[in-house]
Image (cartoon, coloured by chain):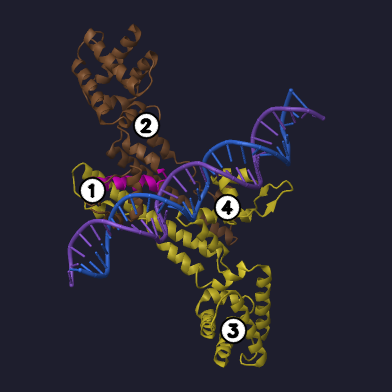
Chain colours: A yellow, B brown, C blue, D purple
Amino acid sequence: MRVKEVADLTGVSVRTLHHYDEIGLLVPDNVTEAGYRVYSDENLTTLQQILFFREVGFPLKKIKELLDSPSFNRLEAFELQRDMLMAKRKQLGTMIETIDKTLRSERGEMTMTNEEKFKGFDFSSNPYEQEARDRWGDEEVDKANKNVAKFGKETQEDMNRIYYNLAELRHTDPASAEAQVAIGEWYTFLNKIGDYSLEAFAGLGEMYVADERFTKNIDKFGDGLAVYMRDAMKIFADRN
Amino acid sequence: MRVKEVADLTGVSVRTLHHYDEIGLLVPDNVTEAGYRVYSDENLTTLQQILFFREVGFPLKKIKELLDSPSFNRLEAFELQRDMLMAKRKQLGTMIETIDKTLRSERGEMTMTNEEKFKGFDFSSNPYEQEARDRWGDEEVDKANKNVAKFGKETQEDMNRIYYNLAELRHTDPASAEAQVAIGEWYTFLNKIGDYSLEAFAGLGEMYVADERFTKNIDKFGDGLAVYMRDAMKIFADRN
DNA sequence: GTTGACTCTCACGTTACGTCATACTCTATA
DNA sequence: TATAGAGTATGACGTAACGTGAGAGTCAAC
C-alpha cells in the first residue's frame, strides 16, 4: 500500500506518515525504485498500535520506546489496550453523569461542589502509562539493551556472540575458569557501553532472574541461561 | 481560588491556566493586589466547558470562538457534550470489538481485512465540530457581533442603544420616517465596524429572520424585533 | 526575620504535525 | 506519444499548546 491508501484507510494524514518515517516510528517495509513508500500488512498492524497509544495520550517518543523494547509483546499490548478502553468507557460514564448533574444544577434543581463538577474530567496522569512502563520497561531495566542499540550493529553482534558463548556453557559449572572468562567478557562488554561497578554487575545478575522481562530475553539464547549468568556474575564479582 | 487550587482540582497545570489567561480563553474574574489570579465559581464552570471541548479535540481558538459567541448557550453546550460522550462511548465499544477480533486473528483463529483492523480507530473528522459550528456559528454569521466586541465597550453600548431604540418602535410602521431614521443609524453603525453595501444590508436583514441564531439574539431586545428590522432594512435599502 | 510554599512574568524549547514550494513519477487519455 | 492530472518526495518554515527553567516578588507560619 502506498501512502495515500494508508492515509485514507486509517484517517491519518500523509504528512503524519512521512513524519513517522522520519522519526523512525513507522518505517515502511518497502520502497519503490522511485522512492515511493510501500507499507506492508505488518506495517499496518504497527500503525494500529501506534494510533492506539497515541489516542490514549502517549507521546510518540514513548510509543517508539515501547515498540522498540525487546520485551515488547504485541498480544500483551492488545490486552492492555482492551483494559484501557474498558476503563475509558467507564470514565465516560462518569462524565455523562457529571454532565447530567451539571444540567440539573444549572436548572437550579440541585447544587454541586467544585470537585463534583470535575468528576471524570481529570485526565492528568494516565495510570496506564505506569502499567505500560512496568510491562515493557524503560530507563533502568532495558538500559543495557538500549545502549547497545545506540552503539550500532557491531556492538549488537558482539553482545550476541557473548550470549551464544555463554549459552553453550550453561550446563557446566559457573565457577569454572572457562565460564569465568566468558562472564568476564560480559563484564568488559557492559563497561564498554555503560558504567558498571562489580556490585552493580552482581546486582544486574540478580535482576536477570528477578525480572521476567530480562529472563525472557536472555533465555531466548538457551533455557536457564539467565540463572546461569546470575550465578556466574555473582562468583565473578566476589572473586574480583 | 488561586491557580494551584484550580490546578489540583482539575488536573491541568498552572502553566496551562497562565496560558489560557494569556490567550484570553479563561481570564480570572479577580486579581489580588499582588497580581495573583483568583478564579471564581463561574470561571470554574467555564473551565469545565473548555476542558470538555479540548478533550473532544477542539483547538483552543475554536473553543474561544464558541464561548465568545453571543449565541453561545451553556445549557445547549452541555447537551451537545452529552451527545458527544454517548457517541464516544459507542465508538469505544467498536474499538473494543476491533481489539478482540485482532486478538483472535493474532492467535490465528480468524482473519481480518485491513479495513476491519481500523474500525473505530478513525478519529480524523469530528462530526460534532460541524454540529457546534451550526449551533454557535462562526465566520459569516456572527461577523458583525464579533467586530463589535473587537471595537470595545463604547461601540457595544452604541449598538445596544440602537437596538433598544428600534425595539420601542417595533409596533409602528417600518416605513415611517422615525423608523427609517433609526434604521439609518443602524446602517451607519454597521459601516463603522464593517463594510456593507445597501444590498448586503438588505441581505443581512433577511438573515435576521432566516437564521434563528440572529433571531434569538435580536428578539432579546423585544419580541418580533428581528422581523421588524428586516422589513425596515429592506425599505431603507430600496429607498437609498 | 527567615524559611518554604506559592506566585508572577519573561523567554526560549519542544512535540507533532500543517503548510507551502519545488520537483519527480506514473497512469489515462486526446 | 505528448501531456495533463493525480500522487509522491524532500526540504524548510510555521503553528499550537503548552513545558521548562530563570529570576524575583508574596505571604502565612514558626
Q: Residue B31 carries which label?
A: 1
**Are both tags, 4 and 1, on one chain?**
no
Please tell me whether residue B50 belongs to the stretch shown in magenta.
Answer: yes
Q: Nearer the viewer, mark 2 or mark 1?
A: 1
Disc 4, disc 3: CB below 8 Å?
no
Question: Which quadrant of the figure has residue B183?
Answer: top left
The front one of C28 and A203 is: A203
Give the side of residue A120 with respect to residue B177, left or right.
right
Q: Position of residue B130 (x, y in %)?
A: 42, 35
As drawn, B188 above or below A138: above
Please tell me whether residue B55 belongs to the stretch shown in magenta.
Answer: yes
- The Cα atoms of the two marked residues, 2 and 3, are separated by 68 Å
Disc 3, disc 1: CB below 8 Å?
no
- The Cα atoms of the two marked residues, 4 and 1, are separated by 44 Å
SS at circle 3: helix
Q: Mark 1 lies on which chain?
A: B
Principal secondary structure, stretch drawn in magenta? helix
Q: Position of residue B179 (x, y in %)?
A: 23, 12
- The Cα atoms of the two marked residues, 2 and 1, are separated by 32 Å
The kind of residue on which mark 4 rests is Tyr
Q: Mark 4 lies on which chain?
A: A
Q: Which chain carries label 2?
A: B
Disc 4, disc 1: CB below 8 Å?
no
Q: Which chain carries label 3?
A: A
SS at circle 1: strand
| Residue under label 2 | B137
Local crowd size for mark 4, using a 10 Å CA cut-off: few (<14), some (14–19), many (≥20): some
Give the extent of the magenta segment.
Answer: B42-59
| Residue under label 4 | A20
SS at circle 2: loop
